[in-house]
């Protein structure tokens, strides 16, 4: 078969060149605009980058769906937690009076907040859904103070790009990009359904990120570090999740 | 219209290059989505209707499967391997392949009249009355007529249109309706379907329909001559007239 004419070769060559150049430009643009997630390497990197970039562009500053009070689930479910550490049990015995949330890293005024300190900041509520990557979900009212207010209190430096956050439970940590960290629905949650946040649901303090799946909503929050790069944390993949094979971005 | 000579048929590609490339990319991505979808499913093989549902909720229906998470037990044990990490990564990567490939295929198909010329049932075939003999003939297991190596009958055309323009868009929509981030931008994606859990249940039902199509499609190809039809979708050539006779 001699169907491969010179014209076909030329147009094919031009298309391939344009394709490669287009990919290179897309790569530069994605990096410049912060559209590449920390776990972008490896076999699943292209899909993960497309998902994160598309969702970042499409959903920036949009509020997660909120529901009427009548839709609050009567039977919310929490994944059983590991037995708490002695330090946690001691704090629990004190009614979490000695619980501190330390905020440090690229901030002007590193601060340790008590729960009372956090409650003195504007407290808001949202009725949103927790969706687990397994497929189940529940709607609850979440009461807390927006993370953005706490970040304003400590004065985030302009070069900061990520907010890393750590649980009292060992090896439980995650991070948000600055856009999601400053999102008005990202709360430091202290209450649930008109009461205190139960320990089973992450009390006394839980990160609430309703634009992302359950596993981004870290329980027993006690440390936040503001940073310009996630490379120095763990294996540098943005959170502990990718180290277990799970995506850093959990908006889908 | 005069019948084309055998010579003319054998030199015209049975399937255009765009159709062949997008077909096989879709096959690969569909199989990846199916395997990873099953992997994700076994972490919670229970289905609900409405906005929310969880292990404490009575399910709409539940699949008799062993699960991969200890807090969901349908009575068949919880010993399945937990593959949601790589499963979800690959599911969404393959979903991008399906969505982008589908976009290229549909835009090309509209531009080149592919849907109008090759997939819309021909004039006179567009009624149930005209479709009936084709259905009964297919059900009786009658061999495909020789001319079907070069064109599709009305039943095939209607089926392909439903798969391309109803099932694939619906499976993508119901998938996106489960994304908390996507539904923050497009709340109607979930609310029009009755909520997040309804979307998940529909995602499963549409997947079953797509699997049904996949099975029948491969069975029909096997009946018509598996290698001949597969070769046509790989090389574009339907085979010489002599071979078909």
Image (tube, coloured by chain):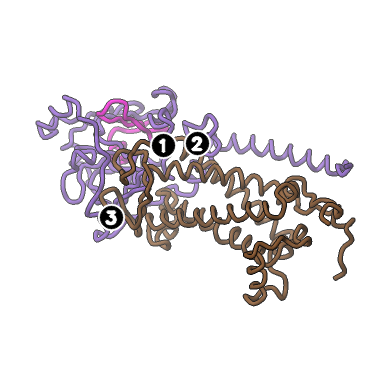
Cα distance in 3D space between marks 1 and 3: 37 Å
Foreground of the two, A251 or A24 = A251
Q: Position of residue A225 (x, y in %)?
A: 33, 28
**Drawn colour of chain A?**
purple
In the rendered view, does B128 fall on the left or right side of B174?
A: right
Q: Is residue B77 magenta?
A: no
Residue range corresponding to the magenta coloring: A147-175
The residue at which mark 3 appears reads as B58
**Drawn colour of chain B?**
brown
Foreground of the two, A77 or A144 = A77
Q: Nearer the viewer, mark 2 or mark 3?
A: 3
- Any part of residue B194 in sight: yes
Foreground of the two, A4 or A164 = A4
Secondary structure at numbered mark 2: loop
Tag shown at residue A34:
2
Name which residue lies at 59% across and 35% down.
Answer: A27
């Amino acid at each position: 078969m001699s169907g491969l004419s010179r014209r076909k070769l030329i147009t094919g060559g031009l298309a391939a060149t344009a394709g490669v150049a287009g990919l290179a430009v897309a790569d530069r643009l994605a990096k410049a605009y912060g559209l590449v997630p920390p776990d972008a390497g490896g076999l699943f990197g292209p899909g993960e980058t497309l998902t994160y970039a598309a969702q970042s562009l499409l959903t920036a500053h949009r509020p997660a769906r909120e529901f009427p009070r009548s839709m609050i689930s009567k039977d919310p479910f929490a994944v059983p937690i590991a037995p708490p550490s002695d330090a946690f049990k001691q704090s629990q015995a004190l009614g979490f009076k000695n619980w501190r949330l330390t905020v440090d890293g690229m901030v002007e005024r590193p601060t340790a907040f008590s729960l009372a300190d956090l409650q003195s900041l504007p407290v808001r509520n949202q009725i949103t859904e927790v969706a687990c990557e397994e497929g189940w979900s529940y709607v609850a009212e979440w009461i807390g103070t927006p993370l953005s207010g706490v970040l304003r209190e400590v004065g985030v430096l302009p070069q900061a790009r990520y907010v890393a956050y750590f649980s009292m439970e060992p090896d439980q940590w995650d991070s948000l990009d600055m856009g999601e960290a400053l999102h008005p629905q990202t709360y430091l949650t202290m209450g649930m359904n008109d009461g205190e946040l139960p320990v089973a649901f992450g009390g006394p303090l839980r990160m609430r990120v309703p634009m992302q799946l359950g596993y981004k909503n870290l329980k027993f929050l006690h440390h936040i570090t503001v940073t310009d790069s996630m490379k120095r944390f763990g294996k540098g993949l943005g959170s502990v999740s990718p180290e277990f094979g799970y995506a850093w971005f959990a908006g889908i | 219209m005069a019948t084309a000579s055998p010579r003319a048929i054998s030199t015209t590609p049975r399937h255009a290059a765009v159709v062949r490339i997008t077909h096989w990319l879709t096959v690969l991505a569909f199989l990846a989505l199916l395997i990873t979808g099953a992997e994700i499913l076994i972490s919670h093989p229970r289905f609900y209707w409405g906005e929310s549902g969880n292990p404490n909720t009575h399910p709409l229906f539940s699949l008799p499967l062993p699960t991969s998470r200890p807090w969901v037990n349908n009575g068949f044990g919880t010993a399945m391997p937990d593959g949601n990490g790589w499963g979800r990564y690959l599911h969404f990567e393959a979903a991008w392949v399906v969505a982008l490939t589908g976009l290229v295929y549909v835009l090309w198909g509209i531009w080149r009249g592919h849907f109008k010329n090759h997939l819309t049932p021909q004039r006179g075939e567009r009624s149930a009355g005209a479709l009936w003999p084709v259905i009964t003939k297919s059900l009786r297991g009658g061999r495909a007529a020789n001319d079907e190596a070069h064109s599709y009958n009305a039943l095939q055309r209607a089926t392909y249109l439903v798969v391309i323009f109803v099932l694939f868009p619906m499976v993508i929509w119901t998938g996106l309706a489960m994304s908390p981030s996507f539904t923050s931008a497009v709340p109607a994606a979930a609310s029009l379907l009755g909520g997040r859990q309804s979307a998940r249940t529909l995602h499963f039902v549409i997947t079953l329909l797509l699997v049904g199509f996949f099975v029948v499609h491969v069975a029909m190809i096997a009946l018509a001559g598996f290698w001949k039809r597969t070769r046509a979708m790989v090389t574009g050539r339907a085979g010489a007239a002599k071979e078909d006779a």
